[in-house]
Amino acid sequence: MKLQNWKATLLIMGATMMMTACSDTSQIANEANFKAALNAHFSKMKECSGVGTGMDDQGFLRTFHAEGRDWTAKERERFEALEKVGVLEAVSFTKTEKSVLNPGTTNIVDYVGYKFSAMGTQYVRPAELDAGSVQSGIPQLCYAAMQVVDVLNFTEPVAVSGVKASKVKFTYKLVDIAPWADSPALKARGKNILEGSEDLVLTNNGWVHHKDMTQ
C-alpha cells in the first residue's frame, strides 16, 4: 500500500475514534448529563396531585350525597374547589337505596358525582407513567413541572443491582404552572429555589432517572 493511502487510512481511523469518544460523552458522570437526565424525567412526570382513589364504571372520581354534609365534607370541599377552577365537572343523579328507618322499603336518593372536565383531561397524567409506584391507579392532575437549576453534588457511581447508579443532589424551581392551579401558595413555590435529590442510573443511552428504567 502506498504511503499516501496509509495516511488516508490513519486519518479515517483517527476520525472514527474521535467520533466514538464523542458519542460516549452522555455516559460521563457530570453535572450537565445529570441535569439533562433529571429535566427529561421531570418534564414527563410533572408535579401532580391525586384526585380520588380511582374511577368507577361510570367515570366518577368520587360521589357524595347531594344534601347535607357528613364526615366527607372536607373531602367534598376539595372536589368543589376543583370544579370551580374548571378541571372537574359535577353530575347530578339518583340512586334507589334501602330505607334505614323503614326496612323493606326503598328511597330515591339524590347524589352528585365528579368527573374530569374536558379541560381537566388535558392535565391528567397518563396512568402508565405511574407503573410500579404507590400511586398507581390513582388519577393524577398535573399542575406544574420541576426544572433543575443547579446540580449541587453527586456520589461516585457504584454498582447497584447490576447497574451503575449515582445519587444526585440539586436545586430546582417550579415552571409551567397550570392556569387553573394559579394559587398564591403555588406561586410562592414557583419563585423559591428548592432542594431535592434523586437516584440516576447509567444505560447504553446515557444517564436516566431510576424510575425511567422500568417504563
Image (spheres, rainbow, N blue to C red):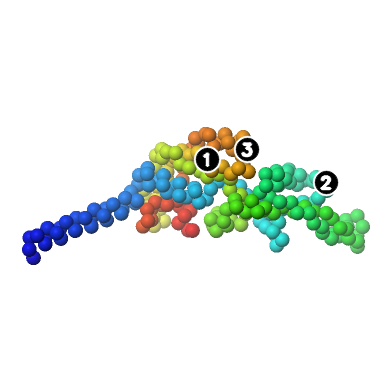
At mark 1, the secondary structure is strand
| Closer to us: 61 or 89 | 89
Q: Is residue 66 left or right of residue 34?
A: right
CA separation, marks 1 and 3? 13 Å
**Image spot of residue 178 (x, y percent):** 58, 44
Circle 3 is placed at which residue position? Answer: 183
- Using the numbered discs, state the Cα–Cα distance from disc 2 to disc 3 in whole angstroms: 28 Å
Residue placed at 58% from the left, 48% from the top?
Answer: 142
Q: Quadrant of residue 7?
A: bottom left
For mark 2, what is the residue? Answer: 68
The residue nearer to you, when weighing 27 against 112, is 112
Which one is in front in this view, the residue at disc 2 or the one at disc 3?
A: 3
Q: Are marks 2 and 3 in contact (CB under 8 Å)?
A: no
**Residue type at numbered disc 2:** Gly
- Asked whether the viewer can see residue 135, the reply is no
Q: Residue at x 41, y 40 (%)?
A: 151
What element does badge 3 sit on?
loop
Q: Nearer the viewer, mark 2 or mark 1?
A: 1
- Whichever of labels 2 and 1 marks the residue nearer the N terminus, that label is 2
In this view, the residue in front, 166 or 35, is: 35
Mark 2 Cα shell of 10 Å, populated few (<14), some (14-19), many (≥20): few
Residue 153 screen position, x and y as percent: 39, 39
- Identified at 49% across, 35% down, the residue is 193
Residue 73 is at least partly visible in this image: yes
Residue on which disc 1 sits: 174
Q: Residue at x 83, y 54 (%)?
A: 110
Neighbour tally class for label 3: few under 14, some 14-19, many 20 plus, Cα within 10 Å: few
Q: Disc 2 and disc 1: Cα gap in Å?
A: 38 Å
Marks 1 and 3 in Cβ contact (< 8 Å): no
183 vs 192, left or right, is right
Residue type at tag 3: Ser
| Mark identifier at residue 98 | none
